[in-house]
Amino acid sequence: MSRTESMRVAVATPEGGIELTTRPIPQPGRNEVLIRVVAAGVNRADLFQRQGRRAPPPGASDVLGLEVSGIVEAVGQDAPLVLGEVPVVPAPQPGQRVCALIAGGGYADYAIAHRRCVLPVPGDFDMVEAAALPEAAFTVWDNLVMRGGLEVPKAVVIHAGASGVGTLAIQVASALDCRVFATAGTAAKREACVALGAERAFDYRAEDWAAAIAAVSGGADVVLDLAGASHFASNMAVLATEGRLVSIGFVGGSVAELDLRQVARKRLVLTGSTLRDRNDLQKATLAEAVYAGLWPRLTRRQVQPIIHTTFDLADARRRARPAGRRHGDRQARAGGRQGAVRTRLTIGYCTDKALPGETEIPI
């Protein structure tokens, strides 16, 4: 493949828009895989990058898109990362159907991924479903299961339950036999949370959800929080003794007041994480855990992503923009056939309000 061959890419403009342009098709280096993109995920980080609120990490592509699915086009020289054990994730091979977590570059006809962050498409998943997996799957397994300590069933609270991460988290916690409670902003979203496995979903604006959950469960063992400061006081109140608060989103603010005596009295654990800025070794280690723990459940369709709609990459300037209300993480799709990529964007979340020009697709 010649470096002079070009591909389409979508990049953010200084004015806050999206520009569709062309660039040379990249070639995979050591430990890298070139993927012919069939689908790519739209995430909040993409919207923040477009708005100029978040820059790509050093060394990452400025092209939007943090997760893709597609066909392995080429594999670079293998220089294995030392993880201490033989890798569980099979090495990607040319022609294989895969999905991948990347630090940028997904809104394109081709994308480069680290070979240890490339996973086979599970079971009978189509490419759109596969593109909806990496960001949410890595986030949920790392924060809810590993940091939350769900080695035994527990009482779990999931905020933003109708988001991309929230919908997957509800299913994962339910599959692990946890008692699951959720919060969401509209009746339709709350109904969706219950349909996915939540015992009850609360209106965080109008209900005292912390008191209600504590009354029926004795308190939450784990709170997966995508809201931040706006929910912090109630999170501290709902946590049971030795409970864990896992903070991964801050749309409600990032600064909150904490009485450390609450932590000491209940022996609480306050933790959290981000994903995009981790190094290759950290992401590869997480990929191994996700593949071993979550991929079998995906293959059996015990857990699956929620897809809302699809649209062409050419429409990215009109469609891939923040909605008036937060409906959840979004995913992007590109559909290809016989080597000719027809890029499409898909959005995956539970919503009661379709984007302009779209019909609502039920869960």
Image (cartoon, helix red, strand yellow):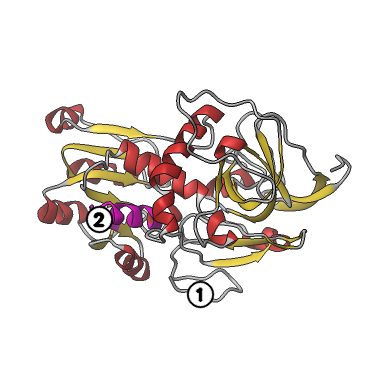
**Residue in the image at 51% along x and 31% along y:** 278
Which label belongs to residue 247?
none
Q: CA distance from mark 2 to mark 1?
A: 26 Å
Tell me where residue 201 appears, x and y as whole percent: 27, 62
Q: Quadrant of the N terminus?
A: top right
Q: Is residue 182 above or below residue 260?
A: below
* In the image: residue 51, left or right of residue 189: right
Front residue of 128/239: it is: 128
* In the image: residue 356, left or right of residue 72: left
**Residue in the image at 28% along x and 33% along y:** 270
Where disc 2 sits, the SS reads strand
Front residue of 197/1: it is: 1
Range drawn in magenta: 167-182
> Quick one: label 1, few (<14), some, or many (20+) residues within 10 Å?
some
**Residue in the image at 16% along x and 30% along y:** 267
The part of the image, by quadrant, that contains residue 209 is: bottom left
* In the image: residue 123, left or right of residue 193: right
> Quick one: label 2, few (<14), some, or many (20+) residues within 10 Å?
many
